[in-house]
Image (cartoon, rainbow, N blue to C red):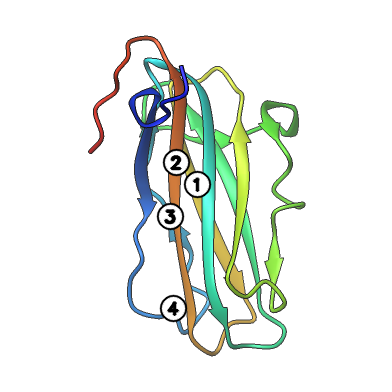
Amino acid sequence: MRELRANIKVEPVINPAAAITDNTVQVGTSIDHQGFDSKVYSMHYGAINDAGLSVTPLLEESDDDVTFTAVADNDMNSTEAAETVDETADNTIRTLGYIGGKRYSRLTLTPAGNAADLFLSASCIQSNPWIAPTTQN
């Protein structure tokens, strides 16, 4: 089947908001993966106006949606270090796939060296549903 929309679910994790002007950690909404076999986080960066800025992702997992621990590198496609961005990453998208076995995960983005306007957002795209078609939020 070539139709993709009925076979994925896209959920907001970190919504676009006003510019981030400091190093405030952006903790994303937890995502329930029940009913999906594949998951990828998509991180969207707008114009980066601060030389020396970096943003580091952290992917965490949980069985109960309460206690989260860092995801091991072998439970991700790519690594958090590989998906860290700096001031050269204007208007880019980075992805981090979760292949672990926990029911919940969440993404946190941590800026460092930020004193200007940073625009970012993130989504989780889940695919290979147990039941299709899927329902979008």
- Residue 59 in sight here: yes
Disc 4 to disc 1, C-alpha distance: 17 Å
- Residue at left 53%, top 55%? 43
Q: Amino acid at mark 2?
A: Cys
Mark 3 vs mark 4: in front:
4
The foreground one among 78 and 55 is 78
Q: Left or right? Give the position of 50 relative to 62.
A: right
Q: Looking at the image, do the residues carrying marks 2 and 4 touch, with CB atoms under 8 Å apart?
A: no
Mark 2: give few (<14), some (14-19) or many (20+) Cα within 10 Å. Answer: many
**Which residue position holds label 1?**
107
Q: Amino acid at mark 1?
A: Leu
Q: Amino acid at mark 4?
A: Ile
Label annotation for residue 27: 3
**Which residue position holds label 2?**
124
Disc 3 to disc 4, C-alpha distance: 13 Å
Q: Left or right? Give the position of 44 relative to 96.
A: left
Q: Secondary structure at mark 1?
A: strand
Whichever of labels 3 and 4 marks the residue nearer the N terminus, that label is: 4
Mark 2 vs mark 4: in front:
2
Q: Amino acid at mark 3?
A: Val
Disc 2 to disc 4, C-alpha distance: 21 Å
Q: Is residue 101 above or below residue 65?
A: above
Q: Secondary structure at mark 2?
A: strand
Q: Quadrant of the C terminus?
A: top left
